[in-house]
Image (cartoon, grey):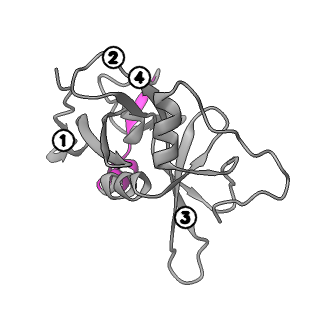
């Protein structure tokens, strides 16, 4: 069964969330195709409510008081480009999640922004379409003054191979390790 997000309406505006419907992708490693079911959390387009927040609640949010965030929604419209680029290249390792960190240029005089996409990757037996499940847990913009904790990089293909074998990459805790900025 395919999970769909549908359309969220605020007053007279409609926000189509179909780009975040689950989808099966394939990654080729050594001539063999490995299928991955990609799922998205509502955290890709919701935020926790702020005091006095008047933004509309997202009805099925996994947050206690999840509010629809137009900025997160607009950023998510290009999320597949970032995932595709990562699937063909490198991903940054977070503490307990794997993270995509995409550096975006800022307008002149402003600090650069990072689009952070934390995800998990696991072996998957719940769906015959895919060997692995990639759960995109969130996606958000962060200015470069607020560092994202990363512990090295790994090729996505290596991450897939390790996950299929029940392993995981070693994290680099060295103080002088490479960082995404």
Choose the circle earlier in sequence order: 1 or 3: 1
Q: How far apart are marks 4 and 1 (CA)?
A: 18 Å
Residue 14 x %, y %: 16, 45
The circle drawn on residue 18 is: 1
Viewport quadrant of the C terminus: bottom right
Magenta residues, start to end: 65-77
Query: Within 10 Å of the Cα at label 2, are there few (<14), some (14-19), or many (20+) other Cα atoms?
Result: few
**CA neighbours of label 4 inside 10 A, class few (<14), some (14 to 19), many (20+):** few
Instruction: Please tell me which residue is depicted at 30% across the width and 15% down the height of the picture.
Output: 126
Q: Where is residue 110 in the image (x, y as percent from the top left)?
A: 59, 75
Q: In the rendered image, which residue does mark 4 sit on?
A: 62
Q: Name the residue under label 3.
A: 113
Label 4: which secondary element:
loop
- Mark 3 closeness class: few <14, some 14–19, many ≥20 residues within 10 Å: some
Asked whether residue 30 appears in the rendered view, the answer is yes
- Name the residue at 58% across, 70% down: 112
Name the secondary structure under disc 3: strand
Find disc 2 in the rendering and name its residue.
Answer: 125
C-alpha distance separating marks 1 and 3: 25 Å
Image: 75 above or below 43: below
């Amino acid at each position: 069964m395919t999970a769909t997000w549908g359309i969220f309406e605020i007053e007279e505006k409609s926000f189509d969330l179909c780009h975040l419907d689950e989808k099966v992708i394939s990654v080729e490693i050594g001539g063999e195709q490995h299928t991955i079911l990609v799922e998205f959390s509502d955290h890709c387009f919701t935020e926790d409510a702020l005091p006095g927040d008047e933004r509309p609640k997202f009805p099925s949010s996994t947050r206690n008081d999840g509010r629809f965030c137009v900025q997160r929604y607009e950023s998510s419209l290009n999320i597949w480009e970032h995932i595709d680029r990562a699937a063909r290249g490198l991903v940054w390792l977070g503490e307990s999640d794997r993270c995509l960190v995409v550096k975006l240029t800022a307008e002149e005089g402003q600090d650069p922004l990072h689009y952070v996409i934390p995800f998990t990757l696991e072996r998957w037996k719940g769906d015959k379409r895919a060997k692995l499940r990639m759960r995109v847990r969130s996606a958000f913009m962060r200015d470069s003054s607020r560092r994202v904790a990363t512990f090295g990089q790994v090729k996505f293909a290596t991450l897939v191979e390790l996950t299929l074998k029940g392993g995981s990459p070693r994290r680099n805790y060295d103080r002088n390790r490479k960082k995404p900025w």
